[in-house]
Amino acid sequence: TQQLMLTAPGMNFAPVQQAYGGYPQFGGAAHDFIFCTYARDMAFQQEYFSIPPITRAYTTTCVITTIAVQLEFINAYQLYFNPELVFKRFQLWRLITNFCYFGPFGFNFFFNILFTYRYCRHLEEGSFRGRAADFLFMFLFGGTLMILMALFVNIVFLGSALTIMLVYVWSRRNPFVRMNFFGLLNFNAPYLPWVLFAFSLLLGNSVIVDLMGIAVGHAYYFLEDIFPREQGGFKLLKTPRFLHWLFDDNTNRDEPEAMPNAEVPFGAGGFVWQ
């Protein structure tokens, strides 16, 4: 057991050696417990930091925000989007926090955070690979449009709409991926946002959020992927240079933009897609 632990691939036990002046010399059960715990912690750390940075930052913020509300460190009333509080009392944090709260722990929270994580990661590791600045700019573009739309509809938390936008953009860039929803429906990826729309309708949820996400997702997809390729078209959405300077590696700044691809690295949405 000891040899297996010490030669586990990717595991660095140097901190343990430094702490004990070598590998600790004590009984089998305690020895196995310490190294199993260390190996598990290292595996979790490696898995966490293998998540692309924007996906990791956004999903972590959503989870921490929900935990903070659940433990009553903060109140949901401090997070929701309220135009009067934002523009008259300058509570500008609400422009961001309303995207980071999916409600209390429950089915709705886990459903949204799972889809957010999966499709955010699909995009960042797929068509936005090596283009963190462009990916962040998509968030800023989508969030800005949703804020403007929220001025005219009674929606105070926009995180679910942002999730649907991510799903929509991914689905349009992967049109030939076959999907299976809860073992009931088989369809191609571009129908996924509409399947989620129908699912929300069946659950009695507000479909305005889904329609907002679909509309904003289509606006981005059209302006980024369709219009520039049309005759006489040109690129309207240009990522500001300071975002490239902050988020992109020097080696990636002068490379041509990656084209959308149809490869899916793992089961999207937490289900077994076929």
Image: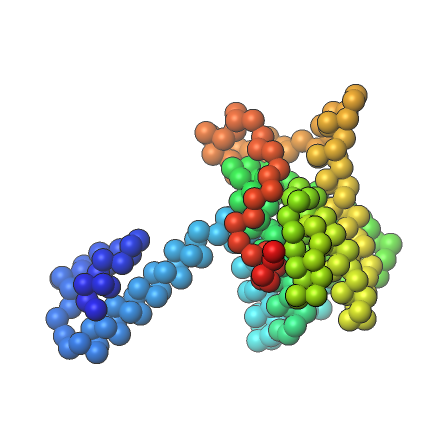
Say above or below: 191 vs 64.
Answer: above
The N terminus lies in which quarter of the figure? bottom left
Q: Residue at x 71, y 68 (%)?
A: 77
For the point 27% across and 58% down, the residue is 8
State the residue lying farthest toward the top: 232
- Residue 231: % across, % down: 78, 22
Count how many numbered circles sit on residues in the image: 0
Q: Is residue 183 visible to us here?
A: yes
Front in this rendered view, residue 207 or 54: 207
Q: How is the image coloured?
A: rainbow
Give the residue drawn at x 79%, y 53%: 212
Taking 44 as reference, is 188 above or below it?
A: above
Q: Where 92 sits versus 44, above or below?
A: above
Quadrant location of the C terminus in the rendered image: bottom right
Looking at the image, residue 22 sits to the left or right of residue 15; the answer is left
- The quadrant holding residue 230 is top right
Q: Is 17 left or right of 75, judged from the image as shown?
A: left
Q: In the depicted view, which residue is nearer to us: 153 or 42? A: 42
Residue nearest the viewer, comparing 4 with 166: 4
Q: For the view shown, which residue lies furthest in the right direction?
A: 152
- Where in the figure is residue 60, as x and y percent of width and height? 54, 59
Q: Determine which quarter of the picture holds residue 239.
A: top right
Residue appearing at x 34%, y 60% in the figure: 42
Please provide percent x and percent y for residue 163: 68, 55
The percent position of residue 44, horizontal first and vertical second, equals 40, 62
Out of 80 and 92, give the one closest to the viewer. Answer: 80
